[in-house]
Each structure stands twice: as C-alpha cells, then as structure tokens.
C-alpha cells in the first residue's frame, strides 16, 4: 500500500514473474513457428509431371517428416473447411431462395467421391502452379477438404435453422448487425456441434489420406511425402512390417492430435452450452488448463482485438440482422419466378452439355450398367446404416449422457474414428481370402469402418447437449426404461442422429470407392458395385465413365436425401428441436 502523499510500494511496480506455464506455451509456439518456416520451402519444390516420383522412400527414418507433412495438410484443410462452413451454411440458412439451391448442391457435393474431385482438380492445380510442387499440394489439400467440409456444413446449418426463437427476438431488440449476430450469436450457438462434427470430419479425412497423397489419376501416379503415401507404398509392396510401422505412427499422430487439439477444444466449447442448471461435471483438459494459466494466449490475442473492431465497422453497411416485417407478395413472387428461371436455365445447359459429351463418347447405354452397379452399392449402404444405428445409438447415448464416461471414452472413440481403416485393408484381404468371404459381403464391413463413426459422434454430441434441467426433471419424475427412451432420449437426440445418418450415408458411398477394390501382394479382391466402377475409370483416365459414375452416385445420394433424410430433417426441425 502507498502511504498518504507518498509513492507506491515496490511490489506495485514489480512486473509479474515469468511462470512455468508461460515458458511451456511460449516454447511450443516458437517450436511450431520454426517447424512451419523450415517446412515452407519444401512445399514449393520444383515439380515436373513427367519426372515426378510415383512413390516415396520406405526408410522408416523419414516417418517423422512424413507425419509432419500430413498434419500440415490436414490442418490447412480443416481451416479452409471451417471458413467454407461459415459462409455456405449461413447463406443456406439465412437466404430463402439460396437455400433451395445450396442444399441440393451440398447433397451432390457430398455424393461426389474424393477420386472424382481428384480426377478434375489435379491437372487444374498443376497448371495453376507450373513447375512447382505447390500445385500437387493444393490438389491433395483440396481432396482432404472435400472429405471434411460437407459434414461440418450440415451440422452448422442445422444449428442455425434450429435456433430458439428467443435468439432471433434478442438480435432484433439489441439491433445487432448481421456480422454481430453471426459472430456473437450464430457461431457460439453452433460451436458444440461444430467441434464434434469437426472432430469427426477430421477423423474421416484420415481415411482418404492415402488416396490424397498417393494420387493415381489419368494413368499417372504422383506421390507426395506423407504418412498416407508411405502406407500406400508399403501395401503395394506387400510389406506387413512397414504397414505395421505406419499403423503405429498413425496411432501416435491420432492420439497426439486428440490430446493437444481436439480435447482442449471440446472442453473449451462447453462454455457455449445454453442451459438453466449447470452440469454436474464438465469435460476437462490438462492442455486447456495450461493455456488458461498462461498469459501468452492473451498477449497473442491482444493485437487481434483491433481486427474485430474493424470488421464490426466494415460490416455495418450490410444492415441489421432482421427481416422485413412485410414484403409485397407480387414482388416476392416475381423474384421467385426470375430466380427459378435462371437456375433452370443453368441446369438445362449443364445437362445438355454433359448429355452431348456422353452421347459422342460412350453412349447412354452405359447408364444402365452403372445404375445396376449403383443398386448393389445402395444395398450395402442401407445394411450398413441399419446395423450401425442399432449398435451405436445406445452406446452413443450412454457415452454422451455420462460426463465421466465421456472423459474416458471420447479419446478412445476419437482414436477408433480417426484411424484410417484402409490401413487395415491388407489384413482384411488376408482374412477374407483365408475364410473364402466374398468382397460383395466383406465390402459392407470395410465401408462401415470409414462411415459408422458419423452416427456415433453425432449421437454423443446430441446426448451431451441435452440440458441438465431436462435430465433432472426426468429423474425426479422417475421416468425410466422404455418410456424414458421413447419420450425423452430418442426425441432429444433425433436431430443429431439425422445429421449423423445423412453424413454417414454420404461417407459410405465415398468409402465404397476404396472398399470395393482391395489388394495386398498377390491377392486382389473386387466387389460388384459403383465404387469399383469409378475407381477403375479414375485410374484409367476414362472421363466418360468417371462422369457417368459420378452422375449415377449423385442421383442415388440425392434421391435418398430428398425422399428420406430431408423429411427426417423437417421432422427434427419442427417436432423434436429442443
């Protein structure tokens, strides 16, 4: 304390001592920046398609470097996916006319397999960055992005359209701008499903890492340094020892990402949970506790505050976050007709051009063969969804409604979901050959390894998001057994299950590309299905068959979404939204 008329005591002027959390966090940031700076030149290495390597070195000493390259691609794709989700989902939720186009387009994008994107984008990105490996890096990151973005967009879109009416009224009363509503209301309101689905999407992207790093399109084979291309080379060589090493490194990577990134993010997102009574136990993270005890995050975030203020000022001309109370019916109808006319014209032009290309090359008769193969894959998808629902919904509810179980089970589930199941396909091939199991049946199991986790993660997220006051009310009223499931649990998780179901279905169609053709050493197994059809066409550079395969797969996925899942979406939105 300072005396009257005197100077403050020495303790007031003394700067806070440097604490060990500050040292740890600061050292981690410095190490991260140093690693990225050392890695940057390799991303822009010289590259010529005619002399590009088709495989990577199998020396295990290179695995740490491969792991870092793969992680950089994954996190860049995650950042791009988050930005895409914010823009696309917000436009679909807030613009009535745009929603009628954006949601069907999202269905189609979800149905297009990763190899379908690669067959088009690889050449485009290579030409965009001639003579540089950056073009192939961008193609790989874009392929990983397509394995992440759609699930996150569906989840955030649902969180926007299912917001309580009170939120909309509060935004109007407080006269929030559109940016303020988005950043202060929409993003916090959708943070929990975004984090959980981001975690699931990140895990699903591991599944396609090998296809994204060891690229086989248009009769060309390109290999980027990464753990996926290392595993692909080991599988092709039939070296189980190196496959085992790749699996061990992948487990370390998945566990590390979960501990250092996803678990802290999950615990941090709990601050955005809206409920009247506080949960008995919240998820915790040692990494998050360390960050909260350190001053470094606050020092790093301090320069970003002026950026937020500037964004607030720049976006004010876009107006307030409110809709006009009255709109002229004639004006609205005229706008609808004009919008529908433009969209119809664009669709008709695209169909005409695609139809002409197919007619002049392979002929329309190929559609019959593709639809028959699609029916076989469709049957596998339906069986997969039914079995996954029966198995994972009860388990997901049990995990999500018990915080203690969540703390233990979530890292385990994250490892299982994130581990690229196609690394295990060589083992599955050996088992199928030994037991004389046809891949027509075995492909269901292989597809499930890459898609069933969408249902589990969304059910866990839905169960954990049930307000504590509702749980306490059910306990106080002694609602147990079948009645508790029928009247409380199933209605509460139904919206999340629908989101998981629609993304699991899309993921299963995508997984069919790598699950209907598997090989290891001298063994090559094939299932009759649309996935094998597209994989063969992509490898051989047969553009007409690639186009037909993508169109047929899009038809099946969009038809299933329109006739079944969208109806479930509306039911969840109107009847079961909390």
Image: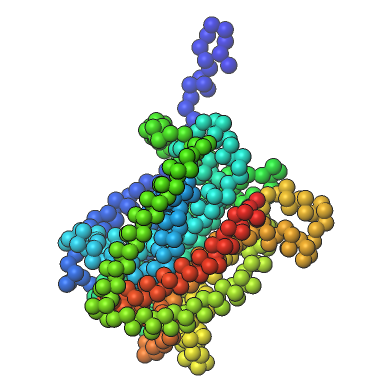
Apparent side of residue 466 relative to residue 562 in the rendered image (left or right)? right
Residue 570 percent across, percent down from the top left: 58, 58
Whether residue 204 is visible: yes
Q: Is residue 24 above or below residue 428?
A: above
**Residue 512 is drawn in which quadrant?**
bottom left
- Of 368 and 463, the residue lying toward us: 368
Residue 247 percent across, percent down from the top left: 44, 72
- Of 253 and 435, the residue lying toward us: 435
Residue 448 percent across, percent down from the top left: 52, 75
| Residue furthest to the front | 330
Apparent side of residue 400 relative to residue 55 in the rendered image (left or right)? right
Whether residue 518 is visible: no
Residue at 41%, 47% (x, y): give it.
334
Apparent side of residue 158 relative to residue 77 in the rendered image (left or right)? right
**Residue 76 is drawn in which quadrant?**
bottom left
**Residue 371 is drawn in which quadrant?**
bottom left
Residue at 63%, 60% (x, y): give it.
494
Residue 480 percent across, percent down from the top left: 79, 61
Q: Is residue 352 above or below residue 443?
A: above
Quadrant of the frame with the N terminus: top right
Residue at 50%, 45% (x, y): give it.
187
Q: Is residue 334 above or below residue 403?
A: above
């Amino acid at each position: 304390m300072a005396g009257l008329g005197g100077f403050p005591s020495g303790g007031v002027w003394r700067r806070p001592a440097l604490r060990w959390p500050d040292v740890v966090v600061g050292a981690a940031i410095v190490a991260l920046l140093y690693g990225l700076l050392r890695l940057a030149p390799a991303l822009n290495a010289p590259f010529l398609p005619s002399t590009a390597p088709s495989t990577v070195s199998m020396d295990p000493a290179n695995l740490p470097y491969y792991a870092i390259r793969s992680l950089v691609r994954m996190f860049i794709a995650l950042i791009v996916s988050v930005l895409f989700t914010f823009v696309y989902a917000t436009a679909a939720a807030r613009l009535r006319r745009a929603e009628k186009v954006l949601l069907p387009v999202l269905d189609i994008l979800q149905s297009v397999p990763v190899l379908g994107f690669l067959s088009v984008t690889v050449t485009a990105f290579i030409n965009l960055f001639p003579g540089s490996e950056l073009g192939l890096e961008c193609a790989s990151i874009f392929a990983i992005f397509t394995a992440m973005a759609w699930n996150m967009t569906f989840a955030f879109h649902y969180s926007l359209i299912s917001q309580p009416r009170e939120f909309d009224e509060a935004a109007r009363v407080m006269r929030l701008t559109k940016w303020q509503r988005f950043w202060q209301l929409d993003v916090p309101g959708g943070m929990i499903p975004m984090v959980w689905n981001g975690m699931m999407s990140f895990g699903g992207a591991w599944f396609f890492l090998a296809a994204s790093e060891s690229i086989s399109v248009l009769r060309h084979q390109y290999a980027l340094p990464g753990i996926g291309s290392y595993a692909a080379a080991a599988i092709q060589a039939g070296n189980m020892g190196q496959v085992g090493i790749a699996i061990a490194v992948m487990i370390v990577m998945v566990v590390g990402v979960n501990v250092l990134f996803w678990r802290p993010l999950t615990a941090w997102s709990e601050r955005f949970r809206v409920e009247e009574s506080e949960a008995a136990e919240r998820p915790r993270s040692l990494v998050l506790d360390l960050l909260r005890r350190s001053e470094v995050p606050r020092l790093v975030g301090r320069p970003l505050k002026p950026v937020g203020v500037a964004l607030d000022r720049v976006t004010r001309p876009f107006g307030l976050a409110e809709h006009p109370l009255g709109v002229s019916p004639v004006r609205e109808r005229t706008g609808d007709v004009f919008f529908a006319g433009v969209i119809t014209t664009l669709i008709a032009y695209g169909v005409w051009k695609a139809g002409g290309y197919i007619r002049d090359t392979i002929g329309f008769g190929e559609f019959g063969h593709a639809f028959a193969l699609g029916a076989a894959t469709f049957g596998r998808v339906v069986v997969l969804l039914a079995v996954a629902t029966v198995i994972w919904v009860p388990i997901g509810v049990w995990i999500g409604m018990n915080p203690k179980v969540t703390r233990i089970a979530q890292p385990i589930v994250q490892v299982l979901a994130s581990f690229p199941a196609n690394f295990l396909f060589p083992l599955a091939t050996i088992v199928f050959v030994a037991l004389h199991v046809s891949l027509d049946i075995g492909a269901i199991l292989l597809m499930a390894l890459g898609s069933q986790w969408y249902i589990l993660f969304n059910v866990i997220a839905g169960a954990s998001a049930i307000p504590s006051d509702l749980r306490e009310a059910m306990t106080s009223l002694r609602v147990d057994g079948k009645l508790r499931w029928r009247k409380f649990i199933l209605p509460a998780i139904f919206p999340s299950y629908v989101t998981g179901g629609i993304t699991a279905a899309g993921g299963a169609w995508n997984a069919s590309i790598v699950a209907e053709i598997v090989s290891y050493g001298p063994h090559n197994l094939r299932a009759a299905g649309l996935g094998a059809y597209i994989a063969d066409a992509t490898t051989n550079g047969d553009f007409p068959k690639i186009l037909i395969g993508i169109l047929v797969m899009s038809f099946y996925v969009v038809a299933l979404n329109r006739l079944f899942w969208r109806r479930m979406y509306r039911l969840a939105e109107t009847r079961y939204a909390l």
